[in-house]
Amino acid sequence: MEIVAVGGYEEVGRNMTVVKYGNDAIVVDMGIRLDRVLIHEDTDISKLPPEELARRGIIPSVGDDYGEVKAIVLTHAHLDHLGAVPILAEKFPLAPIIGTPYTIELVKQELRGKRRNPLYVLEAGEVLQVAPRLSIEFVRITHSIPDCVVLVVHTPEGSLAYFNDFKLDDTPVIGEKPDYQRISELGKEGLKALIIETTRVANDGRTPSEQVARTLLEDTLLKSSPEHGLIVTTFSSHIARIKSILDIAERLGREPLLLGRSMEKYVSIAERKGIISLPENAHIYGGKDAIKKALKRAARERERYMLIITGHQGEQDALLTRIANKKFEYRIAPGDEVVFSADVIPNPINVAQRYALETKLKMQGARLFKGLHVSGHASREDHYDLLKMLQPEKIIPTHGTLDMLAMYAELAETLGYAINREVFLLRNGQRLEV
Ligand SMILES: [Zn+2]
């Protein structure tokens, strides 16, 4: 088996890995790097050729020596795992794109007219033969988007597991807890290799459950002032979080207005797929005019609504930023409450934009409530537990900068692994034979 580190091995973003067995190969994930998109926000990335996008570090740099690609497998619908599909999938036009129902529905939307590859839905718990000596299996896992899975690649000579992304959440607000039974079976059957994310390995302890974020939100929102405006901002793809916020809106007797293009995309698909059911008085608007109208209505009766909107990172074109910039009839009034159910993604652009946003909101008299959030990624002790369950022969850390990959290697050392004997830190473009 050969593992090709294509993208995500030097950064948080643009995840892509190739797993080769003989001349057959599977491409796993095809992501973009979002902070690089932000730097180039003046250019329309859909108009740039793939080579230029790769040169700018936005998409993975794809080689042409992967053998015969039998499948493109997507583990979940975050953009750093599937955002490059519309640009790169056509390099392998015969390979079906395989994912869980929610993921495939989003791929359909991303590809719209320009679809060439066949799409194939595989559920967690199912196995699919993609070549005579190569099959894939999806195992249920928890993260911060519905329908996320672990990929297991089976060959006659052993298996590889790909945990990117995941957390170990025993009380997720929607969906079920991880399939621990299958995960420990994989360990007993013997894993040749483990590819594993390292995004939050620097954080001590375990990542709290999504249930904790729900309690934090209840604790703050149930005390909110009934006479003022109430705005909550969170990740539009975080459907479990949005469900908690909607449930609280109902208890407060406020009508939820879900606004923003990406909010409409992720939430309507989740509703169509039966992952979430919206209360009858909830409305979703994604189009420019519809948003403008809804905000006009809300401006006249601000105490009646709860706004659930995009913009928690202070992104220039997101709704909360544009409200703070007084682009709508709905203005922040003194005493209005703005709740951030998201942490700042720690890159300098986000930090600066968020700082500017918070300052503007405060100057207009808003009361800010921050940090009502838990991560979707495993922390150090989750990684420890998982590694003990899986006991793989070889480990390839991914989804991080070199210091994050190294920190994972250090953790593995405490369980008896050694760098360059069992743990391999790859750079983008490098290969490893297992
Ligand atoms: Zn993710």
Image (tube, rainbow, N blue to C red):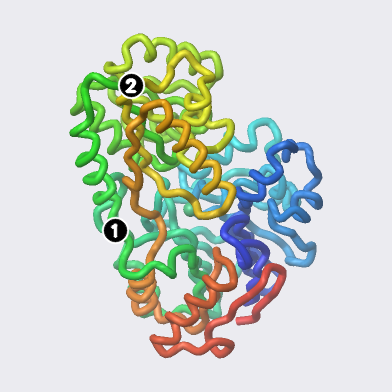
Q: Would you name the residue on which mark 1 appears?
A: 208
- Of residues 379 and 299, the one drawn nearer to the viewer in this rendering: 299
Label 2 secondary element? loop
Q: Earlier in the sequence, mark 2 or mark 1?
A: 1
Label 1 secondary element? loop
Mark 2: few/some/many CA within 10 Å (<14, 14-19, 20+) = some
35 lies left or right of 151:
right
**What residue is shown at x 19% (from left), y 33% (from top)?**
222
**What residue is shown at x 28% (from left), y 48% (from top)?**
213
24 lies left or right of 394:
right
- Do we see residue 131 in this rendering? no
Rendered image quadrant of residue 218: top left
x and y percentages locating residue 10 in the rendered image: 63, 66
x and y percentages locating residue 382 in the rendered image: 34, 69
Q: Is mark 2 within 8 Å of ligand 1?
A: no
- Of residues 1 and 248, the one drawn nearer to the viewer in this rendering: 248
Q: In the rendered view, tell whether residue 289 sits above or below residue 279.
A: above
Q: Would you name the residue on which mark 2 appears?
A: 282
**What residue is shown at x 78% (from left), y 67% (from top)?**
65
**Amino acid identity at mark 1:** Pro
